[in-house]
Amino acid sequence: METLRPKRLHPGDTVAIAAPSGPALPQRRGQLDRAVAEIEAMGFKVRLSKLVEAGDFHFWRSAPPEVQAAELNGLLNDPEVRAIVPFSGGNATTAYLDRIDYDAVRRDPKPLLGFSDITALHLAIHSQTGLVGFHADFAAIGFGETWGTAAPERRDALRALYRGLLTGELPEADLPAETDWETWKPGKATGPLLGGLLDRLINVQASPYALAPEAWDRAVFFWEDVGRNIGHVWNQLHVLRMQGVFDRVGAMVVGIPSQISDRDLPDGTTANVKDIVLDVLGDYRFPVLAGVDFGHTGPNLPMPIGTLAEVDATARTLRLLESPVD
C-alpha cells in the first residue's frame, strides 16, 4: 500500500475534537477547555463535535458503534475540518472498523491524532488507504492534562513539534527525549513507523482490516501497553512473531508501559517488560530502543505511522526523516 500523507494544516484551520471512543463526560469539562486552549495556542480553530458537546455515554462509550462511525465519517467528509483530535481513548473503535468511510479518507486525507484505543482506527485506515495516522496525544489526558503538568520548556518544545509536523514546517525532526531511553539491543535502522497500542494492534490483525505482511518490511515497529498482565503481553508478542512480523521489521521501539507490573517467579526473582521482550526476540538481531516518551504516561511524542524514521538504539536517538503531511 502506497503511503497517503494527509494535507498539511494552515494557521486558522479548523481542528475538530470528536468522541470516537470514550465519552466527554461533563465532569471532564476542565480537561476539554484546557485542550481547546492548547490547540488554539498552536494557531488553529477548534470545533467540538456533537457527541463531545452532548457529553452523553452508552455503556463505557460515547455512543453506539453506528453513531460513533457516523460522527467520524461526517468529519472525514467535512471540507472545513482539517484535522481530528479524539477527546479520549477507551475501548470502542474495533467495533466499527467495518463502518468507516475509507473512500472519504482517500478523497480528502486529513490528520487523525490519538493513541490507545485510537490505534485501531490508525492501523485499519492505514491498511485500507495508506493514510499516515498521528499516534499522538488526544484532548483529555493529553492536551488537557499531562501537557499542563509538564515543565514549561517541555510543553513549548512539544507545541512547536506538533505544530511543525502538522503544518509541514518541519521536513525532518529529532524526537526529543525527556526520560532516559534505553538500549535493549544495539544497532541502527531506517524504515517507516508502524505500531501503537499492542492490544489494539492484535485486534486489527485478527480482523479483515489487518496490515498486509509486506507492510512490516523494514518497519520501525513501535508499541506500548497499559493495565495488562505481563504474561498477556508476552503471548501477544509471540503472536506477532508467528505471523512473521519480526522476520520483516528493521527495528523495535518500546514506549513507556503503564500499569504492567513485574511478575513474581518461583525462584523469588521477577520478570519485567524488558525480560519478556528479549525472551520473545531471542536471536533476532534488529535494534531495540526502549523507554521512549509515548504511551499512557504522557505527554506523548508524535509517532506518525508510515513516516520514514531513523532509530539508533546504540546512541538512543529517534529521528523523523520526512514530513508526515503533504
Image: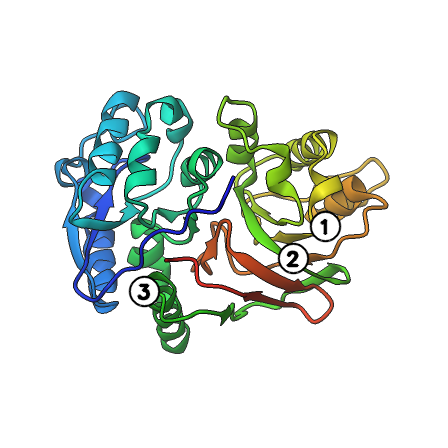
Q: Secondary structure at mark 1?
A: helix
Q: Secondary structure at mark 2?
A: strand
Q: Is residue 256 above or below residue 260?
A: below
For image coordinates 73% across by 45% down, the residue present is 277
Instruction: Give neighbour class at mark 1: few <14, some 14-19, many 20+ (Cα, 10 Å).
Output: few
Q: Quadrant of residue 325?
A: bottom left
Q: CA distance from mark 3 to mark 1?
A: 36 Å
**Is residue 12 found left or right of 68 in the rendered image?**
left
Mark 3 or mark 1: whose residue is earlier in sequence: 3
Residue 271 visible in image: no
Instruction: Give neighbour class at mark 3: few <14, some 14-19, many 20+ (Cα, 10 Å).
Output: some
Q: Position of residue 315 (x, y in %)?
A: 70, 71
Mark 3 or mark 2: whose residue is earlier in sequence: 3
Residue 122's mark? none
Q: Position of residue 301 (x, y in %)?
A: 47, 61
Q: Which residue is mark 3?
A: 167
Q: Which residue is mark 2?
A: 290
Kindly check if marks 3 and 2 are in contact, taking CB atoms under 8 A apart as contact: no
Kindly check if marks 2 and 1 are in contact, taking CB atoms under 8 A apart as contact: yes
Name the kind of residue labelled 3 in the image. Answer: Thr
Q: Position of residue 20 (x, y in %)?
A: 30, 35
Q: Quadrant of residue 242?
A: top right
Q: Which residue is mark 1?
A: 274
3 or 2: mark nearer the eye = 3
**Is residue 181 found left or right of 271 in the rendered image?**
left
Name the kind of residue labelled 2 in the image. Answer: Ala
Q: Is residue 263 above or below residue 218?
A: above
